């Protein structure tokens, strides 16, 4: 199955927004053994969308179109698709009802032009919306197919996983293509991409020769450096077995050469890794943040069930808040002493067993004689306070993001050492 | 001049890296009045690159190709271009000398396969490298042209500005085109995309007829709904004048039909809009958050200079923290009373003039008898407390994100009303 992605939107051509949809789709198609040989971007212009769709349908078996399904006059993907199919648009009354209800629930009147979203090319079937109002469409074109999805990333992803992917996999089976491509991502924090590549160079070459499994490195900013293993097998079980064997080898090499840097697998983020360890240890956490200004707390709260182990936090952006609310001794606030006092103070003020704190210089200006990128992490655990000094590079946003995941990694490693030591409580 | 961008690289199709080159090029082409109607991504495969290049040359006057010029075996853009031009590759000995020197300067021996970068399709001219080793190529194809540039962003950008843009502008002049395209984005919060489109439908049609300015709508999730105005003028000043006039018209229509929903222009985010107003009013702010867990504070801290007006915040995730630290009366915490008490309490605890607070149900489970998506915003300003009830839809992440920008918008509107009333202080 050759799948082509067509992203519709003049804003893409003008470079006003990045096309994250094509990247996301490419990643998820590959992970499911579906090849995509081309992507296209096209503007909000009827004839050009028609040309892009015809080009894609000529060189691929299936086309995924993102964008141009909204209610406004410049949303014309439906019309262009109808031209390609050479059929009229017909209003789907059941869709009209669904949209009416969508607006009624919000206590708003439905604007007239919203009805355009209920127009369906004859012969197409609807993919129900669960988040917005624009329905998706499955449009048969001879033996081929085009899927029309909204451009809003979470609506697009939801429809892809719920309707498009199952249909593509069914067509793949029908076409007698059974090779399954499976991949697994080891997520790391605390090493450089080149150091990882160097440590795994031997495995990399051995796998190149073998050809069944590949290793790729993916620097993912605040999400760490990902090591992606991709295996091709006769079926899911065969591919999975190859991945299990290779993951074990790779983990052994990394542990020996670079230490405890693998914090998660696949979608397991650093905050989930921390959450799992806190629940296992039966500990509650509070955080105190200055330069991150709530980023650490917000990532922890993003984990469902956080209320079982997360008490809350204090964003002590002004120094006065550190002194008054957290009992930090007056003095330079960008210091190990301050970080430690913040950690102990927030645990006391919010009544948690564990306290995690960060203080530092996000930049662009230095502070307390420390250069931008200087960060201190304080950890209050089992009655003891430990501090860690970080020297980060980059602009304000990068320093704040890297501080967030680095501080969570300090907690993760401490909880692992504690578990290994058999939960000794001071 | 219609320019098409073709980005070469399997890693783009697999979604392993984002294609920032096409976005960058789209932005710079538009800024110079050069239209780009299509972008393509294609993998490292000879026949598919040939097909992508032929497709692009058929529908555009000029094609910019990024990537596939490196020294390794999977860098085959040169070969594909030679096939399209139907000419042989010839080794350019002067380029070999330049590369030798590049390696000698670094005290390294030049790998044999690096010589491939000195191969040039007969009839093509070279764009000298100033940063790496892969030279760019200008390849005439009949009356049209293809520019081959490296995929490394800064090498690509350097060659575009030094060689490609001047050549394109010269071809544009020769073709008698001199228009400049400029655009401006009005950022809104508090209305639906369809309501905006309906309010502006008349302008939309008038502009369609006129042809010099276009309006587009861009639903951007937590960043609100963007109204983009794009103007084509003889020069930058003419395009700017068209934008000024249309922005005034559009703002008037929106204000009359939908009220005070425009919070910023272009890159002005909601947190920047709030920051500007707080500094103008000389007020300091503290925030109390439950379901957002620090998202509001972290967005405020992302504004450079936040220390001038942002004191800090309390993430009162556990109810106990609301009662003990913020003095919220015991009882259901998902309520207008609780939101108001949190706002007053955090201003008192952190010593700020303004207090903003949110409490609500992110889901998936209901709380205090309220359904997921029920959110209360509390605002403490000039000694008075006001509360707002929101009913949001979507999953946990969406509810938390929409709560964040909605709460900031409540503050923005209150500060605007306050300024309009002449800074009356209770």
Image (tube, coloured by chain):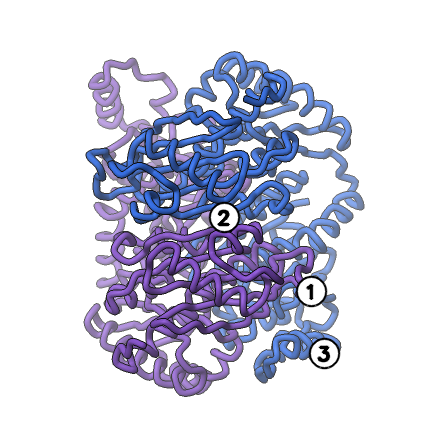
Chain colours: A blue, B purple
Query: CB of mark 3 within 8 Å of CB of mark 1?
Result: no
Q: Nearer the viewer, residue B328 or B254?
A: B328
Counting residues from the start of the chain, the first of labels 3 and 2 encountered is 3
- Is the C-beta separation of discs 2 and 1 under 8 Å? no
Q: Is residue B323 above or below residue A88?
A: above
| The label number, if any, that marks residue A97 in the structure image | 3
Q: Can residue B71 be spotted in the picture?
A: yes
For residue A298, the mark is 2
Residue B77 in sight in this render: no
User: What residue is at 59 percent from the left and 50 percent from the top?
Assistant: A4
Q: Chain of mark 2?
A: A
Mark in front: 2 vs 1: 1
- Where B252 falls versus B410 (above or below)? below
Residues under numbered marks 3 and 2 in contact, where contact means CB atoms less than 8 Å apart = no
* Label 2, label 1: how far apart the Cα atoms are: 24 Å
Q: Is A39 left or right of B165, judged from the image as shown?
A: right
Disc 2 crowd rating (10 Å Cα; few below 14, some 14-19, many 20+) is: many
Q: Is label 3 on the same chain as label 2?
A: yes
Report the chain holding disc 3.
A
| Front of the two marks 3 and 2 | 2
Residue B329, percent across and down?
55, 62
Q: Position of residue A96 (x, y in %)?
A: 69, 78
In the rendered view, would you say B326 is above or below A172?
A: below
Residue A171 percent location from the top left of the image:
76, 48
Q: Quadrant of the C terminus of chain A?
A: top right
Q: Nearer the viewer, mark 3 or mark 1?
A: 1
């Amino acid at each position: 199955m050759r799948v082509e992605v067509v992203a519709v939107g003049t804003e893409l051509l003008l470079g006003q927004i990045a096309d994250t949809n094509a990247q996301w789709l490419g990643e998820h198609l590959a992970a499911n053994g579906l090849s995509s040989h081309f992507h296209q971007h096209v503007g909000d212009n009827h004839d050009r969308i028609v040309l892009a769709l015809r080009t894609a349908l000529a060189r691929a078996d299936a086309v995924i179109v993102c964008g141009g399904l909204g209610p406004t006059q410049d949303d014309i993907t439906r019309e262009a698709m109808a031209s390609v199919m050479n059929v009229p648009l017909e209003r789907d009354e059941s869709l009209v009802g669904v949209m009416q209800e969508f607006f009624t629930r919000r206590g708003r009147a439905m604007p007239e032009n919203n009805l355009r979203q209920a127009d369906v090319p004859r012969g197409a079937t609807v993919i129900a919306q669960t988040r917005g109002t624009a329905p998706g469409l499955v449009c048969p074109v001879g033996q081929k197919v085009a899927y029309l999805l909204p451009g809003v990333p979470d609506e697009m992803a939801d429809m892809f996983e719920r309707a498009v992917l199952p249909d593509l996999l069914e067509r793949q089976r029908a076409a007698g293509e059974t090779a399954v491509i499976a991949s697994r991502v080891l997520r790391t924090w605390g090493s450089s991409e080149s150091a990882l590549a160097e440590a795994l160079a031997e495995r990399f070459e051995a796998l190149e020769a073998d050809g069944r499994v590949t290793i790729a490195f993916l620097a993912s900013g605040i999400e760490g450096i990902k090591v992606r293993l991709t295996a091709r097998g006769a079926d899911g079980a065969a591919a999975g077995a190859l991945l299990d064997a290779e993951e074990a080898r790779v983990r052994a090499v990394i542990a020996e050469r670079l230490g405890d840097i693998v914090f998660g697998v696949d979608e397991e983020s650093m905050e989930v890794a921390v959450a799992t360890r806190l629940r296992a240890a039966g500990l509650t956490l509070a955080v105190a943040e200055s330069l991150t200004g709530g980023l650490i707390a917000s990532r922890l709260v993003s984990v469902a069930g956080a209320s079982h182990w997360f008490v809350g936090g204090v964003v002590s952006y002004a120094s006065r808040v550190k002194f008054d609310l957290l009992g930090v001794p007056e003095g330079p606030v960008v210091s190990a002493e301050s970080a430690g006092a913040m950690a102990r103070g927030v645990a006391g003020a919010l009544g948690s067993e564990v306290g995690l704190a960060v203080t530092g210089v996000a930049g662009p200006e230095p502070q307390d004689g420390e250069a931008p990128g200087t960060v201190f992490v304080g950890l209050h655990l089992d009655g003891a306070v430990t501090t860690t000094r970080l020297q980060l590079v980059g602009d304000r946003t990068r320093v704040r993001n890297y501080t967030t995941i680095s501080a969570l990694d300090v907690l993760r490693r401490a909880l692992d050492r504690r578990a290994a030591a058999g939960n000794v409580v001071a």
